[in-house]
Amino acid sequence: MWQFAISSGLPHFYGKMGSYVVIVIYRSKDKNTTQGNLSELVGSHIGGKEECKMDHMDYQIREIRQGEYAILDEFLYEAIFIPKGVEAPPKSIIKKPELQVYVSDFGRKDDCCLVVEVGGEIVGAVWSRIMSDYGHVDDSVPSLAISLYPDFRGQGIGTVLMKEMLALIRKRGYKKVSLSVQKANYAYRLYLKAGFTVLNENEEEYIMICYL
């Protein structure tokens, strides 16, 4: 059975954040863009020691453009937490009403989204909106969702993307943001590091909140 772990918006990216990464960030002339480089790394982190090596990877984080809203369907699907050994659901599953709440008519006043590009291709997204989703707290708190394509998980990109998003939400005047995550999802520890705390829980998931 498939489980929907959505960060008060989406099932968060479930790639392992198991190693430390050297991240060099700099602001471009475009104030809405963050650029950087992920360089080779070796480190230990969650759940013991783990080695992670990677080539230099240049990336760019920016706000999504209106003509790109449709790509959120892809990242909504990628955000679905699929436990090990469980067959992935068909992509048509995102058409279910309980998932469409994350992306339907995106671009409303309170909607906010950042994407990350590598080599000119969008490989990840984080977005928030006021909605009645799995991580809903109240109508004044936006719910957040984040996901990356599989090949770009576990490399530190999600950490930088989350940091930029929290700063943007704070800049927009919100005092807190929420999300939901399956207890079996490695992303739970990423959220703790990002400043989220557990507000509530049930048998399968945590409702988390970050005070900005």
Image (tube, helix red, strand yellow):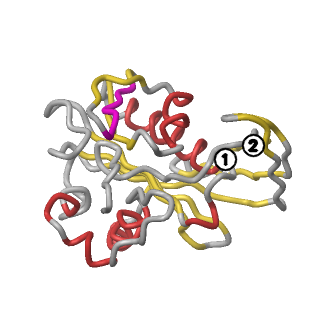
Nearer to the camera, 148 or 170: 148
When the figure is inspected, residue 157 is found, relative to residue 119, above or below; the finding is above
Q: Which residue is mark 1?
A: 156
Quadrant containing the C terminus in the rendered view: top left
Please tell me in which quadrant of the rendered image residue 43 appears: top right
Q: Nearer the viewer, residue 20 or 63?
A: 20
Residue 54, label in figure: none
What amino acid is at disc 1? Gly
Instruction: Using the image, determine if residue 109 lies above or below residue 200.
Output: below
Q: Tag 2, which secondary structure?
A: strand
Picture quadrant of residue 27: top right
> What is the x, y in percent for residue 196?
44, 27
Q: Residue at x 63, y 67 (%)?
A: 151
Any magenta on residue 205? yes
Which badge, 1 or 2, comes first in the chain's sequence?
2
- Left or right of 202 in this view: 146: right
Dot in front, 1 or 2: 1
The residue closer to the viewer here, 28 or 166, is 166
Range covered by the magenta-colored residues? 204-210
- Residue at 76%, 42% (x, y): give it: 21
Q: Does the CB distance between marks 1 and 2 fall below 8 Å? A: yes
Instruction: Name the side, left or right, on which 89 lies relative to 149.
Output: left
Relative depth, front residue between 73 and 140: 73
Q: Quadrant of the N terminus?
A: bottom left
Is disc 2 surrounded by few (<14), some (14 to 19) or many (20+) residues within 10 Å? some
In this picture, residue 193 sits left or right of residue 11: right
Return the x and y of residue 133 as percentages of the image width and height.
20, 46
